[in-house]
Image (tube, rainbow, N blue to C red):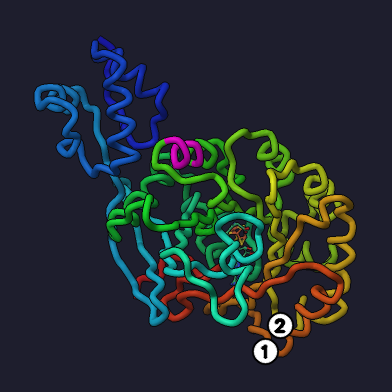
Amino acid sequence: MESLATEILGLNIQELTDLVANLGEPAYRARQLFQGVYKDRIRSLEELSTFPKFLRERMKQEGISLSTPVIDKKFVSTDGTIRYLIAFPDGQSVETVWMPEGDGGETGDGSDAGDEEESHSGLPKKTYDRATICVSSQVGCAVNCQFCMTALLGLKRNLSAGEIVGQITTVLNDHSVDLDKKRINIVFMGQGEPFNNYDNFIKAVRLLVEGVGFPQSRMTVSTSGIVPRIYDLGKEDVRPKLAISLNASNDVERTKLIPINKKWDIASLVDAAKVFPLRNRERMTFEYVLLDQENDSPQNAREVVQIIRGLGDKQASAKVNLIAWNSGPEIPFNTPSDSRVHAFQKVLTDAGIPTFIRRPRGRDIYAACGQLKRTTA
Ligand code: SAH
Ligand code: SF4
């Protein structure tokens, strides 16, 4: 007989239906499995209380397993951010970051995730207990952005859909989160380029929406600019919001910082953004890492204004998130002063472009943007 050996975490309802059919069980068992693994976030088959013991035993004998990822290490920042080192059975590991109160990346994005901050005057209006989880999509990354520490790892391998979802369920369980009570945002901004692992990434998104119970409006994916996949994302009926890492104001500079700009330049990014279909009230974000004396002059800011104006109709839906570079060893850039960051922001806001400064989270424990390279001390 054909072996049924398989890993359950990462299977969708269709695949679970096939699995239980092969076991000779009725279809409702697939729904119970789906509910147990994703909504109830069980950690092992033993916790699957809707299944009789004999059935769980049989599954085990057939080699059907549920292996949720394991927290290898946990680093806690003075600002409350937690960097998790999450390990997989093959010995690889990635980082997942928990940011209580988010990182400000949500601000002004037109969704319910950002609204409460947009409406404030002074201190953020806290209507909900909230947090943001930053998830990895690959072990390491192949894109080789010159300012990013993940690039130093190179690409080790892709993560499966189950490994992406598992990072989130594991972190949610570590905080005993009740998703009905707490407002959690997910950002695909950890290790890796999500669009270089597109199929697993988008499968994970569907499992998070249909299984775990996240609204798609509370998820954002960031890409370094894999243009064909931006078009693909636009065709998905379930998808996160889009953030594009612009990071430079002209092609000469961008090619220097992000080598794939040779293949997909700024004009091709703008073309893709122009036709990207947005949902009601949805915004698209352009991220810009500010590197001192490198891409952070007022002239650079004026060039960014021109790029955003090139979006035509979509200009009104665009916002810019500025991230002052988070430093790391072996990387030859500097963090700009606050005054340079504010001067850059002013050029954009004066041109009518909503522009926000991302608050660095967890810099002291190597948890901030671009610092994820499995530092273990
Ligand atoms: N690979 C994807 C998503 C992960 S990086 C991407 O590149 O978009 C998330 C964001 O952090 C990106 O906008 C990236 O440009 C930025 N980033 C990378 N290294 C950084 C650093 N050292 N300091 C600040 N931001 C950085
Ligand atoms: Fe990869 Fe993003 Fe880092 Fe670039 S910034 S190397 S795409 S993780």
Percent across and percent down for residue 100 are 42, 69
Quick one: 47 or 313, which is closer to the camera?
A: 313
Front residue (pair 345, 280) = 280
Quarter of the image where the N terminus is located: top left
The residue under label 1 is: 337
Badge 1: how crowded within 10 Å, few (<14), some, or many (20+)?
few
Image location (x, y in percent) of residue 235: 68, 34
Q: Could you tell me if residue 87 is visible in this image? A: no
**In this picture, residue 180 sits left or right of residue 188:** left
Point out the image quarter for the C terminus. bottom left
User: Where 204 falls versus 374 (above or below)?
Assistant: above
Q: Are dots 1 and 2 in contact, CB under 8 Å?
A: yes
Type of the residue with mark 1: Ser
Q: Residue at x 32, y 46 (%)?
A: 90
Q: Which quadrant of the render holds ligand 1?
A: bottom right
Q: Secondary structure at mark 1?
A: loop
Q: Is residue 82 magenta?
A: no
Residue 243 is situated, as x and y percent measured from the top left of the image, at 66, 55
Are there few (<14), some (14-19), or many (20+) residues within 10 Å of tag 2? many
Residue 341 disc label: 2
| Spatial CA span between label 1 and label 2 | 6 Å
- Residue 321 vs 212, above or below: the answer is below
The answer to whether residue 4 is left or right of residue 264 is left
Is ligand 1 closer than 8 angstroms to the Cβ of mark 1?
no
Q: State yes or no: Cβ of the residue under disc 2 lies below 8 Å from any atom of ligand 1.
A: no
* Residue segment shown in magenta: 205-210
Q: Main secondary structure of the magenta part?
A: helix
- Give the camera-side residue of 188 and 180: 180
